[in-house]
Structure formats: C-alpha cells, structure tokens
Image (cartoon, coloured by chain):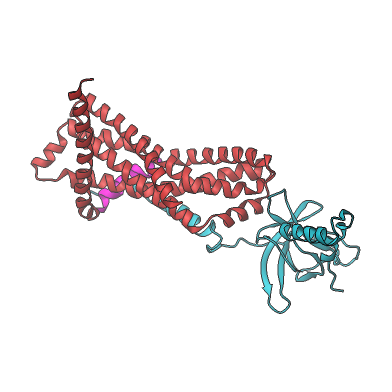
Chain colours: A red, B cyan
Amino acid sequence: MSNGDRDGLIVEGIRRLGSVVIFLARLLAQCAPALGRPWLLVHQVYNAGARSLIIIMLSGLFVGMVLGLQGYDLLHRFGSVEALGSAAALGLLKELAPVMTALLFAGRAGTALTSEIGLMRATDQLTAMEIMAVDPMRYVAAPRFLGGVIAMPLLTAIFSVVGLYGAQLIGVQLMGVDRGVFWSQMQDSVELRNVTEGVVKSLVFGTACSLIAVHEGYNAAPTAEGVALATTRTVVASSVLTLLLDYVLTATFL
Amino acid sequence: MRPNRTLEIGTGLFVLLGFAALLFLTTQLPASGVKFGRAMLGYHVTAEFDDIGDLKVGSPVAMAGVRIGEVAGIRFDSKEYKAVVTLRIDPQYNQIPEDSFASIQTTGLLGGKYIGLSPGGLDSYLKDGGRIEQTQSAIVLESLVNKFFANYASKGGDSQSQGGDNRNKVESKK
C-alpha cells in the first residue's frame, strides 16, 4: 500500500466520523419537530420495537436458560448453588441483556432501517421530497432514529425479565435450587443502580445503533450494490461500537 | 396519516410489555423496592433468636431437610434485644409439636441460612400465632474462630477441651 493510499484511508475515516457527528447534530435538531408528528414516531416504534419482540423474547429465554445451566454447573462445584439467582440477575441486567439486545437490534431493525432509507435514496425519493420542500431529515430520518432510541430500553427490559424466568426455569424447576432462596438471594444482591446501569447502557446502545443505521442508509450510494454495502456496514459498525461502548460504560459504572 | 389497527395493537402491546418489564425490574428485584405480596397460605409462628446471622425474609424453613415453609418477617425486639422471626409454614404441615426446636443452619459452605426445625415430643401442635420456645442462634464463623483461639491460648494448647462451647448457645426459656 502506497503512502498516499494510507493517507487517503485515514482522511476518509476522519471524514466518515465527522459526517456521522454532523448527521447526529442535524438529527437532534429535527427531533423536536418529529415529536410533533406522533403517528410517524409510533409507526417507527412499531417497526423497531414491536416487530422485534418475538426474536428478543426467544433469545432472552434461551440466554437465561443457558445462564441457569452454566451457572448451576459452576456454582455446584463450590457448593453454593444458592448464588445462582444473584449471578443470573446481575449478569443479565448489567451485561447480557443490553449487549445481546443491541446486537439483535442491529441485525433485526438496523438492517431494515438502512435498506429502507438506502432504497429511498437509490430511487430518488429523498431527492423528490427535497424538491417538494419537505425535509427528509424531519420526515424520514428523525422518526426512525427516535423510534430506535425509544424501543431499545424497552426491548432490553423485556429481554432481562424473560431471561430471568429462563434461568429460574432451569435452576429451580430442573436443577432443584430452592425457589425462595433463588429469589431472595437475587433481591439481596441486586440494587436499583444495577437496573439503572442496564437502562443507561441500552439507551446509549440504542442511540448508537439507530444513528449508524439511519446514517448509513441516508448516505448510501444510490445503487443496488451501494444499499447492500451500507446494510453490511450497519451490522458491522453497530456490533463493534456496541461492544466497545459496553467496555467504556462498564468501566465507568464500576 | 392514521395507522391501521394491527399497528396500534402491536405498538400498544410492545410499550405495555416494555414498561411492565421495567416496572418489574425496578420494584421486584432490588430488596429496597416495593413488593407486591402474593397471597400467603399457611400459618405463622414466631421464634426469638439471639443472633440470626444473615437470615433473610424468604429463606426456607425445613424439617428433616424438607422445605415446609419460609421466613415471612424479621424484626428486632428492642426490649429483649432479640431478633423475632416470623415463620410461615405451609398448611399441610399442621402437626408440628409445640415444643419443637428451631435452629439457624447454613446450606453449603458459602450458602444462605435457613431455619431447621427438629420435632419435640408433645402431643399438642403449633398453631397460627404460636411461638417456638427453644431456639439456637446462627453460628457465626468469626466468633467460633475467636472462641477457638481464646480457648487454645488459655489452655496452653490443650486441644482436648474445645468441644463443649457450642452447647452454651442452646437456650431454653422454660
């Protein structure tokens, strides 16, 4: 790789970062007007949230069940299976639920957002709106962004609760941990700030994933290949950014 | 742009579920949260302990290792300086002798505490509002270790005489 190419790559990376930040500022400026059109927003909450319910609940159930199984196997060696409840609850609330939900959200809702907006761009619908003096940022981008931000914490909470019942299903029904011990140990070790931590994480992940999805779609090359590339970039960038932000947030909260 | 019925129902269901889950997480999980009590079956008896260790509300009550109820409440008696523990016993176990003996025991090495009941010999049974007279406190590992070393030092390393200490903790109010 020649020196010029590398410089080009670095400049291109910085340009993309700048474009995302400017896009975020424009989005935030349009958020208040978007709230003034609640039906547009409701539609996007439905698209991002309600239609992800099944995949979130199913994944949550199995993540919780695996947690119950693995946790029991590990704690059994130390003769302290009573701690299963608190281990499962803390693991789910603080890490697994926000991260898994964000990854699933990027795959399920993020790709849909990117390809939808990207196709609007490719078929000149966004340009048509601009010609009609309708700001596509306000009517297309902002409601989709806000819908994702609103849907993510709710999806995460649902994931946590379903996961807890999954862990309980395995731990209590199958492995025979005492139900009262399971719940009382859990209530003992979980504090309100652990719940808040999960909610804050999911809000940050929701903002990041929605921003990337909308930005990639909005700036996709107006070709079939461009939309495909943008969709791929959405999943890759969202997933990596989620895990990176997760580390930063965890370090902040601990 | 008024959306259709499916969309309204779907969104409503999603938001409802989401907030219900959030409410559950904030109120039910932390011990400080507000509990929505479920219907309590069975009958309640009380027992007084000098030291309950880290016994918690919800800890099991077992007889011969079988769970027969749970700890329903713990409060501090400021006159006698004792912990008053309320036990909820499942209704089918209604033939527990009145002079049964309650002790606080530990499950596993690091496990939580539970209350073990050993049956007495009387023909009259515990009833709702009854009281278990004979109790044994939780064995606190640190104080046991302290006592062991104190004994060890005073006896000049005579390891024969360590056994009897635990029996002092058994107390009878009769």
Q: Is residue A233 left or right of residue B115?
A: left
Give the quadrant of the C terminus of chain B: bottom right
Q: Residue B40: within the magenta? A: no
Where residue B128 appears, x then y in whole percent? Answer: 76, 69
Where residue A222 appears, x then y in whole percent? Answer: 17, 29
Q: Main secondary structure of the magenta part?
A: helix
Q: Residue drawn at (61%, 60%), measured in percent from left and top?
A: B38
Say how many tags the image has.
Answer: 0
Q: Residue drawn at (87%, 60%), measured in percent from left and top?
A: B164
Residue ranking furthest to the top:
A1
Vertical position of residue A103 compared to residue A38: above or below = above
Please tell me in which quadrant of the rendered image residue B51 appears. bottom right
The reply to whether residue A154 is in sight is no
Depth check, front residue: A149 or B4: A149
Please tell me in which quadrant of the rendered image residue A79 appears. top right
Q: Is residue B56 left or right of residue B65?
A: left
Where residue A112 appears, x then y in whole percent? Answer: 31, 35
Please tell me in which quadrant of the rendered image residue A236 appears. top left
**Residue bounds of the magenta highlight:** A38-52
Q: Is residue A145 left or right of residue B141?
A: left
Where residue B154 appears, x then y in whole percent? Answer: 83, 62
Residue ranking furthest to the front:
B156
Residue ranking furthest to the bottom:
B79
The reply to whether residue A253 is in sight is yes
Depth check, front residue: A41 or A244: A244
Vertical position of residue B93 compared to residue A64: above or below = below
Q: Residue A39: within the magenta? A: yes
Depth check, front residue: A170 or A191: A191
